[in-house]
Image (spheres, rainbow, N blue to C red):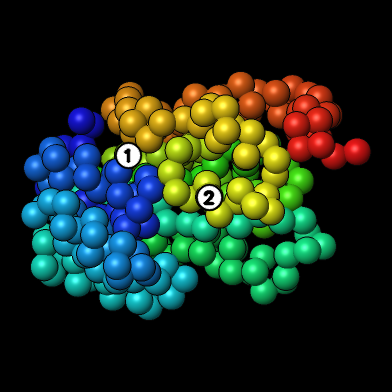
């Protein structure tokens, strides 16, 4: 494993990629603080290893994030790696999704990223050591109908992280933006009913990326000093978006049965 520290913080640790990241760190002997808003999920995850310690935290609340990070360092020690995996993934058309819901998606996915990075970055910079890994998405580069709120939030995350990485490229920190395709986690279920038909298709045809493949790609990328990783089908999708956005929209509309 490419993690060389003793203490890790993982948001969204109650389920999905967050839980998987936390467990892998714990299996390697690290002390892991898992953050989530769902206390039941937190407790279930924490019960899987004595190395995991649960902290209820709402990433949309900046003060709560700052206080939680301070508490973790007081109780577990200096944080060597921060992994921000918390997020929500509702799907629907712009017309049908309420403005309040769209705003909530941005609060959780984008502003959650802002709050977590702002809480962790000064501490890591002061020590001139550590890792910061944040989950964007390929949907932040390649868009889809019935997915506007999620795509917009992840486009914001991708842009924010690329700039953060560039601003701190000589800091000594290892900072990584992860932009995966659809991954086989419970998060995907949020978009099944009213999200893009493509989401249902990849799930039914079992074409979603496995959790382990994403974890392996992250560790390989950060060990090699990469700053952005596009695992699995994300890379060809990204290239198609760059080279022929009209063709990508045509393919997307066909899959999503948009006339």
**Residue 65, disc:** none
Q: Residue at x 43, y 75 (%)?
A: 61
At 69% across and 53% down in the image, what residue appears? 194
Q: Quadrant of the C terminus?
A: top right
Where is residue 102 shown, x and y percent of the image?
67, 65
Q: Name the residue: 49% across, 24% down.
A: 232
Q: Is residue 239 left or right of residue 12?
A: right
The image quadrant of residue 138 is: top right
Quadrant occupied by the N terminus: top left
Q: Residue at x 77, y 56 (%)?
A: 93
Dot 1 or dot 2: first in sequence order is 1
With 94 as the anchor, is 235 left or right in this view?
left
Q: Residues within 10 Å of mark 2 (few under 14, many from 20)?
A: some
Q: Which residue is mark 1?
A: 174
Q: CA distance from mark 1 to mark 2?
A: 32 Å
Q: Quadrant of residue 226?
A: top left
Q: Is residue 122 visible?
A: no
Eye-nearest disc, 1 or 2:
2
Q: Please, is residue 70 above or below residue 188 in the view?
A: below
Q: Picture coordinates of residue 47 (x, y %)?
A: 16, 57
Position in image of residue 58 (x %, y %): 40, 71
Q: Which residue is mark 2?
A: 189
Q: Secondary structure at mark 2?
A: helix
129 to 201, vertically: above or below? below
Furthest-bottom residue in this view? 63
Which corner quadrant of the image does residue 38 belong to? Answer: bottom left
Question: Which one is nearer the viewer's eye here, 190 or 217?
Answer: 190
């Amino acid at each position: 494993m490419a993690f060389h520290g003793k203490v890790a913080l993982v948001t969204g640790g109650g389920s999905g990629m967050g839980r998987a990241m936390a467990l892998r760190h714990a299996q390697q002997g690290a002390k892991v603080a898992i953050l989530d808003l769902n206390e039941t999920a937190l407790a279930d995850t924490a019960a899987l290893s004595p190395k995991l310690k649960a902290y209820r935290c709402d990433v949309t609340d900046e003060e709560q994030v700052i206080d939680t990070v301070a508490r973790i360092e007081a109780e577990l020690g200096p944080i060597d790696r921060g992994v921000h995996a918390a997020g929500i993934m509702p799907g629907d058309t712009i017309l049908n999704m309420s403005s309040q819901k769209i705003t909530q998606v941005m609060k959780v996915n984008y502003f959650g990223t802002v709050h977590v990075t702002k809480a962790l970055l000064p501490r890591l910079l002061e020590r001139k050591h550590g890792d910061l890994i944040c989950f964007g998405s390929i949907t932040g580069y390649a868009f889809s109908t019935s997915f506007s709120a999620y795509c917009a939030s992840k486009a914001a995350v991708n842009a924010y992280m690329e700039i953060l990485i560039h601003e701190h490229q000589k800091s000594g920190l290892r900072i990584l933006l992860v932009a995966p395709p659809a991954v086989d986690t419970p998060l995907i279920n949020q978009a099944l009913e009213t999200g893009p038909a493509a989401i249902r298709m990849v799930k039914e045809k079992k074409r979603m990326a496995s959790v382990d493949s994403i974890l392996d790609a992250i560790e390989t990328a950060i060990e090699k000093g990469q700053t952005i990783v596009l695992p699995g089908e994300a890379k060809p999708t990204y290239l198609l978006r760059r080279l022929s956005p009209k063709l990508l929209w045509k393919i997307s509309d066909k899959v999503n049965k948009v006339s």
